[in-house]
Amino acid sequence: MRIYNSLTKQVEDFKPIDLEKVKIYCCGPTVYVHSHIGNWRTYLLADLVNRVLNLNGLKTDFIMNLTDVGHLFEVGDDPEGGEDKVEKQALEEGKTAKEITKFYIDSFLSDYKEFNLTQPRKFTKASEYIDNQIDLIATLEEKGYTYETSDGVYFDTSKFKKYGELSGLSVEDVKEGARVEVNPEKKNSTDFALWKFSPKDKKRQQEWQSPWGVGFPGWHLECSAMVLAELGDSIDIHVGGEDLKMIHHQNEIAQSECATGKKFVNYWVHGAFLSIDGGKMSKSLGNVYTLNDIKLRGYTAMDLRYLFMTASYRAPLNFTWESMQNAQNSLRKIYEIIGSYEQDPNAEISEKYVKKFKDALDDDLNMPEALAVVWELLKSNIPESSKLNTILKLDEFMGLKLDEHIGYEIPDNISDIAKMRKEYRKNGIWDKADVLRREAVDLGYIIEDLPDGTYKIKKKF
Ligand SMILES: [Zn+2]
């Protein structure tokens, strides 16, 4: 696989540190609002990276974080700079910070499933890694990279020679980021808070004891602490939105490499922006669309997935309701075509199309080109049952759940077996249930148990 590395600004051959397990980390959501479709574009990129590596025969160890502690600042100009989003939302909704984060975590995980994204080994919650974050600051302090001001402990970016390698901006270049309120005590404008002290006059809902005083960690710190704790000092791939590259990711590198003395990330993979109707997504324009907004207009998570597949992850994508409609039309067309195909579990999978498709993805995840191969396959004159089995194989990369749209009827004898098996399971007669499951497999069908106690019958391919 070849992939564009934001660090070297080149498309490179992907070489894992450990052939047995590729370590991947993706910056996840801050859980005080529902994730919007721009966020989902990034998470779909992380999913695609995992799928392509898995299908290249590599196992991945994938971690995604959930920022469930005070998030002091937002990207861009924030008129309310310095405000804690979680606590603010809690106040607005009349709930505790914990209730807020739990609610939005549940919502995120449910959407995540609906998008059919690769499950990470763990969704790490920042609140469960406070000790790791404190330890990381202590290490940085010991090595002389920190200094204290009246409002917190800061990282001195002038002490990290490679600062600016990812962002392309040196310590002198960067103006005060809008992320933290302007602080005249900072030595360099690029310096950032590792630990912020709680205000003296007010008790925060989320605050912890530390060697420097009661307070809470800076946002950049959590990703470094969680990567080091879960994946180790050096990882293969770090995925994130382009908006995080300049400051957040540059700071992750600074903290991690100064603490460990090792290279933090080999490949930085950034997803490009999503614009809406040619402009920015913003609360005031009412266009910060979530999955729910999409569904209210009659579209599905898979329709949006398809839409995102029509552009390279490195190309900015402009979302319009018209493009959403076009994506739905195309996907429905695929459902319709494959629904009409005759099935034959033994029909040959076309290696030619699989290879062509895979070659496109191995070339810096070129999904638009891969998608063109799908249409080429559907229009080709190979037998329909082969086309069907081939597109189902390709769907292992695409994740469009095409198997749910195959127009086969389940024969009565298979339905009966499944029903009987359910009865056995209900009564705890596991051995007989298992015999029936195997019987169905021998007849070419898989009975899949769903978490809600029901089951689904799928044809075996
Ligand atoms: Zn991060």
Image (tube, rainbow, N blue to C red):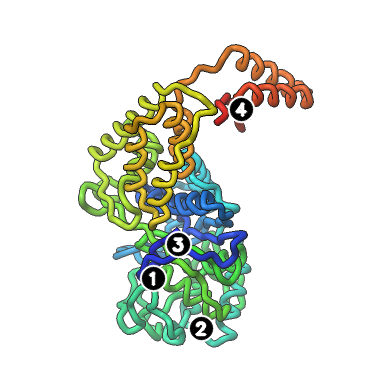
**Reading the chain from its start, which is encountered first: label 1 or label 3?**
3
Q: Residue furthest left?
A: 278
- The one nearer the camera, 134 or 29, is 29
Q: Which residue is mark 2?
A: 146
**Reading the chain from its start, which is encountered first: label 3 or label 4?**
3
Q: Mark 1, mark 2: which one is toward the viewer? A: 1
- Quadrant of res 435: top right
Mark on residue 71? 3
**Reading the chain from its start, which is encountered first: label 1 or label 4?**
1
Q: List x then y, in percent, for residue 401.
A: 46, 35
The residue sitting at 52% across, 49% down in the picture is 55
| Tag 2: amino acid | Thr
Q: Is mark 1 within 8 Å of ligand 1?
A: no
Q: Mark 1, mark 3: which one is toward the viewer? A: 1
Mark 2 in CB contact with mark 4 (< 8 angstroms):
no
Q: How many marks?
A: 4
